[in-house]
Structure formats: structure tokens, C-alpha cells
């Protein structure tokens, strides 16, 4: 199997790139393992024209959009290896045993969130437990919420949350908070709970209260956390792409090309602004840059 472009990852970034490349008559293989970052979430917010749509139905619609383009194929499989072959091509192998080559590679493999280790967090995550204020903060105006993070992280998050909601409690999960962070909490009238959390309680995805190892329970409608995230795939490392201090793949901002010629990056992989709208835009930008590179190769543009 020979393709113009191998797109690794079928989230908003990869599918957006495939759409533009399909419209440029490029042969494209999208390989997607199917663990898009926001699949736990009940709704996408901040996406113009698709506000409140569920991530699953958004992805189904995006794949349906692609079915019109006969040069674009989408496969549900993991890419296990990519290496540079001769004549400016890349060879790849999929977990389902298929293999092939492509002239360009677009890595749209996304990130994986590190969930805090809190008992009963999983059924609440994405519905009433969140990590992103831009995605979900608006819905909590006027509701009681908690900010969770070890050491100063929960306190720093709580201070920022004050812009979105007035009733915020910072929780440090049994870790010490610095005097400076405590002063800042006091300045903004934010209570602090330092006890370890025993569990989160709720039903149907809705948080109702936080139970601590000691002290009274805390009634809350939502919890935001600040832990971290890491790359979903090590393919960028194995291809030799340079990373920045935040662990994002370094790109040329005009073309989305990485430090390895022919390897492009779109979406959360670059760890820039982590939103669906931005992933879609970066996928489109990378696709245009890839098509231009082909046009230049074929003497059709400078
Ligand atoms: C709980 C939650 C809620 C969110 N809510 C919002 C919101 O309301 N609004 C908003 O704008 N943003 C939201 N986000 C952020 C949003 O999900 C991401 O910005 C967006 O998904 C990034 O798109 P992407 O295409 O870069 O990566 P992803 O959507 O993560 O897709 C990457 C894909 O690549 C696949 N992949 C990885 N490695 C390989 C491999 N080797 N081979 C094949 N496939 C591979 C993965 O399995 C995955 O399917 C939320 C995130 C989370 C975690």
C-alpha cells in the first residue's frame, strides 16, 4: 500500500487534515486507535457551529464527511512503527499486521490526561469532574465547585476559577500548601481543605459531595483538577522530532512541520492551545502545507 500521506490519529486534528487532503485528490490513510481524548465528556463546548455536540456524534459526522472522498481511507488500528525509507518516503506498520509507505506523515496522536487518584472519579469524569475551564467552566457559574491539585496546584487553580465561579474551595489532597499560596487564597476568600480525599460521591455522572479522611464532607456540584498529561504516542520520539520544555513536539508555526522534514504535527501533540477548534485548524493548516509541498515537488508552484 502506497499513500501520499499517512495520518496517525483520527481525532479532530487528523480528520480535519484528511478532509482537506481528500479535497486535494491526495491519497490518504488515516490510522486511528480510537482513544480520542474527550471521549469521556458528555459535550464539546467552545466549538462554533457544534456547541454542545457529544464527542462521539461529532466524530461520527466527521468520518461521514470523509466517506465522500474516494482517495481517503480510515482504518481502526494502531501504527506501531514508522521509519524513513529511501526516496523521501516513510514506511509504516500497523497493529493489524498491514504495512505500507507514504511520502509525508502527519502525527495527530493527541495526549492522555493523568487523572487524580481519587476513589470513584471515573464515572464522574467528563460530566462533573473536569480539567479545563475553557471547556467546562461556564456551566458552573453560581454552583459550588472544588479545585483539586497537590501542593500549590489546587490553590493556583482555585484562584483562577474565581473568574468563572464565586463558590470555590481549594483541596490539596493531604499535601502541604505554601504560605504564599495560602495568602493568595485568603486574598480571594477561598477556603482550603488539606485533608486527604477518601472518595467522590455522586450519581449519573453528577458529583454531589467530596468525602475526606477527616473532617466534614463538602457538598459540591463540580470539581476541576490540575494534574497533567503526556503524549499518547512515542512515534514522534522514535522519528527524532524535537520536543519543547512542555513535552510538546516543536513545529514551524507556518507549516506545522516538525524538526524532521516530511513529518508534520497537528492538534494536542504540539501542546499549544488544547481545544477541538484549534486541533481542527492545525489539521487544516498542516494539510495545506503538505499539499503545497507536493505542488512544489511537481513544479506547480514556487
Ligand atoms: C474530558 C475532556 C473534555 C474536553 N472537552 C473539551 C471541550 O468541551 N471543548 C474543546 O474544545 N476541547 C475539549 N477537550 C480537549 C479536546 O479533547 C482535545 O483538544 C482534542 O481532542 C484534540 O484533538 P486531537 O485530534 O489532537 O487528539 P485526539 O482527539 O486525542 O485524537 C488522537 C487520536 O490519535 C489516536 N492515536 C494515538 N496514537 C496512535 C497510534 N500510534 N496509531 C493510531 N492512532 C493513534 C488516539 O487513539 C486518538 O484517537 C476536552 C478534553 C478532555 C480530556
Image (tube, rainbow, N blue to C red):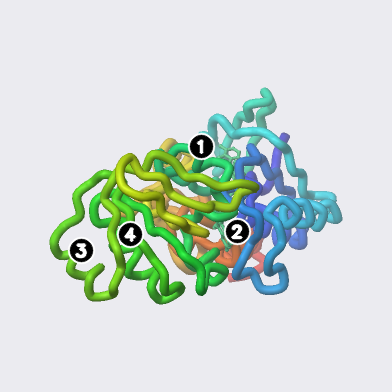
Disc 1 packing (10 Å; few <14; some 14–19; many ≥20): some
Q: Mark 1 or mark 4, which is nearer the start of the sequence?
A: 1
Residue bearing mark 2: 290
Whole-Å distance between the Cαs marked 4 and 1?
49 Å
Residue bearing mark 3: 181
Please, what secondary structure does the residue beneath circle 3 have?
A: helix
Write the residue at 73% across / 57% down.
58
Query: Any mark on residue 170, and which?
Result: 4
Write the residue at 63% across / 51% down.
11
Q: 236 and 183: which one is in front?
A: 183
The answer to whether mark 2 is within 8 Å of ligand 1 is no
Whole-Å distance between the Cαs marked 2 and 3?
47 Å
The x, y position of residue 277, in whole percent, is 60, 66
Which residue is outermost to the left? 179
Write the residue at 77% across / 62% down.
23
Please, what secondary structure does the residue beneath circle 2 have?
A: helix
Q: Quadrant of the C terminus?
A: bottom right
Which residue is outermost to the front? 216
Please, what secondary structure does the residue beneath circle 4 have?
A: strand
Q: Is residue 105 visible?
A: no
Amino acid at each position: 500500500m502506497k499513500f501520499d500521506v499517512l495520518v496517525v490519529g483520527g481525532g479532530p486534528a487528523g480528520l480535519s487534515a484528511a478532509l482537506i487532503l481528500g479535497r486535494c485528490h491526495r491519497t490518504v490513510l488515516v490510522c486511528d486507535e480510537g482513544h480520542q481524548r474527550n471521549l469521556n465528556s458528555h459535550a464539546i463546548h467552545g466549538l462554533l457551529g457544534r456547541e454542545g455536540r457529544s464527542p462521539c456524534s461529532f466524530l461520527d459526522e466527521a468520518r461521514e464527511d470523509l466517506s465522500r472522498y474516494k482517495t481517503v481511507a480510515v482504518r481502526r488500528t494502531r501504527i506501531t512503527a514508522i521509519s524513513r525509507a529511501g526516496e523521501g518516503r516513510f514506511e509504516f506498520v500497523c497493529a493489524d499486521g498491514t504495512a505500507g509507505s507514504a511520502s509525508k506523515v502527519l502525527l495527530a496522536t493527541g495526549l492522555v490526561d493523568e487523572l487524580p487518584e481519587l476513589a470513584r472519579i471515573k464515572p464522574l469524569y467528563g460530566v462533573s469532574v473536569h480539567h479545563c475551564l475553557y471547556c467546562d467552566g461556564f456551566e458552573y457559574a453560581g454552583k459550588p465547585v472544588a479545585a483539586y491539585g497537590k501542593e500549590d496546584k489546587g490553590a493556583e487553580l482555585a484562584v483562577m476559577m474565581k473568574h468563572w465561579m464565586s463558590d470555590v474551595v481549594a483541596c490539596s489532597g493531604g499535601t502541604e500548601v505554601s504560605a504564599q499560596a495560602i495568602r493568595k487564597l485568603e486574598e480571594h476568600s477561598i477556603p482550603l481543605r488539606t485533608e486527604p480525599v477518601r472518595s467522590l460521591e455522586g450519581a449519573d455522572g453528577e458529583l454531589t459531595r467530596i468525602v475526606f479522611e477527616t473532617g466534614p464532607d463538602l457538598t459540591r456540584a463540580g470539581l476541576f483538577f490540575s494534574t497533567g498529561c503526556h503524549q499518547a504516542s512515542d512515534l514522534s520520539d522514535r522519528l527524532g522530532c524535537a520536543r519543547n520544555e512542555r513535552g510538546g513536539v516543536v513545529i514551524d508555526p507556518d507549516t506545522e512541520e516538525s524538526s524532521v522534514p516530511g513529518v508534520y504535527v497537528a492538534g494536542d501533540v504540539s501542546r499549544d492551545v488544547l481545544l477541538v477548534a484549534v486541533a481542527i485548524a492545525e489539521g487544516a493548516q498542516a494539510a495545506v502545507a503538505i499539499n503545497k509541498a507536493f505542488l512544489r515537488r511537481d513544479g506547480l508552484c514556487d
